[in-house]
Image (cartoon, helix red, strand yellow):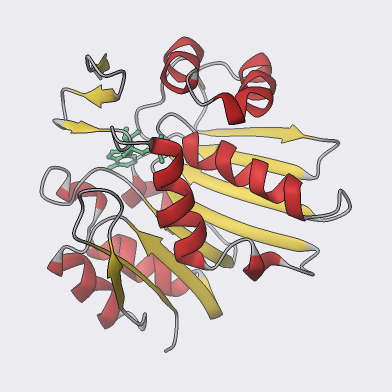
């Protein structure tokens, strides 16, 4: 899988013809779309254990921003479980180069990069802060990895390049599996408002809330599972 960096420094996938995150400000986008879109950090207040599933690990920006928000708001005794699926993992250099300008994440990035190396197994597990933050990266196509999971998500981060450019990421398998792995109050957020995404979510019991998108994007979606 090819990997490129645009002139403005934004990581880019030539194969998918799409960026990994917004060229306007990737970290602000993550905080707006995925954290605020899911009502975080308020939604994890007083939770001793919290589970997030992400579709598309990419550069790890969403994970590192979540870890930072978790550390700033939660006691060390509570546990964050972050499950993410990535078919085309990046190298540690590609990750550190992509995120080096986000100085707010510096501590988390260097901690992550000190132990991460491009995974060679289909399930890659890392523990941080004495196990209070755990990430599991499934190195497989989403349509193969999700049916193997047996966990209940509190929150979904639906990332994964635009549906028009990467329809394989937004299949009925994703939406059916979201239903199977969600419970009362599980929420999701995504940067896209594509109609096929709305349809898949609605047909599987998720409410659709449209909000202004980040930066130049007109709309994004978020909502809760309400079968
Ligand atoms: C927009 S990027 C994710 C950005 C990421 N969340 C971040 O914080 O950098 C989308 C990711 O989905 C991965 N991907 C694309 N198609 C996939 C598939 N069918 N199964 C699993 N991962 C896929 C790509 O390799 C890419 O890393």
Drawn side of residue 177 relative to residue 137, left or right: left
Nearer to the camera, 149 or 216: 216
Q: Quadrant of the C terminus?
A: bottom left
Question: Image height check: is 56 above or below 190?
Answer: above
Residue 189 sits in which quadrant?
A: bottom left
Q: Residue at x 44, y 87 (%)?
A: 226
Res. 129 in view: yes
The answer, for residue 148, to whether it is visible in the render is no
| Residue furthest to the bottom | 227
Q: Residue at x 47, y 23 (%)?
A: 99
In which quadrant of this rendering is ligand 1 seen? top left
- Please give left or right for residue 75 compared with residue 59 in the image: right
Q: Residue furthest left?
A: 164
Q: Residue furthest right?
A: 77
* In the depicted structure, whether residue 95 falls above or below residue 26: above
Residue at (27%, 80%) from the top-left corner? 202
Q: Nearer the viewer, residue 189 or 206?
A: 189
Q: Is residue 17 left or right of residue 101?
A: left
Q: Position of residue 180 (x, y in %)?
A: 46, 73
- The answer to whether 167 is drawn above or below residue 115 in the figure is below
Instruction: Give how far across and how far down residue 36 sits, in percent.
Output: 49, 61
Q: Nearer the viewer, residue 50 or 97?
A: 97
Residue at x 15% of width, y 67% of height: 196
Report whether 108 appears left or right of 198.
Answer: right
């Amino acid at each position: 899988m090819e990997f490129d960096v645009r002139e403005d420094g934004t990581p880019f996938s030539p194969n998918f013809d799409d960026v990994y995150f917004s060229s306007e400000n990737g970290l602000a986008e993550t905080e707006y779309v995925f954290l605020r879109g899911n009502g975080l950090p308020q939604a994890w207040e007083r939770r001793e254990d919290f589970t997030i599933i992400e579709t598309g690990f990419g550069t790890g920006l969403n994970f590192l921003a979540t870890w930072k928000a978790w550390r700033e708001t939660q006691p060390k005794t509570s546990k964050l479980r972050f499950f993410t699926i990535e078919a085309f993992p990046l190298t540690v250099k590609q990750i550190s180069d992509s995120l080096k300008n986000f100085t707010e994440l510096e501590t988390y990035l260097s901690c992550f990069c000190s132990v991460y190396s491009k995974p060679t197994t289909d399930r890659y597990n890392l523990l941080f802060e004495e196990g209070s933050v755990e990430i599991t990266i499934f190195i497989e196509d989403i349509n193969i990895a999700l049916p193997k999971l047996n966990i209940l998500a509190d929150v979904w981060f639906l990332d994964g390049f635009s549906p028009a450019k990467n329809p394989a990421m937004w299949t009925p398998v994703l939406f059916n599996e979201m239903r199977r792995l969600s419970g009362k109050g599980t929420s999701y957020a995504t940067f896209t408002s594509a109609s096929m995404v709305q349809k898949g979510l609605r047909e599987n019991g998720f409410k659709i809330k449209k909000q202004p998108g980040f930066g130049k994007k007109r709309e994004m979606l978020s909502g809760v599972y309400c079968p």
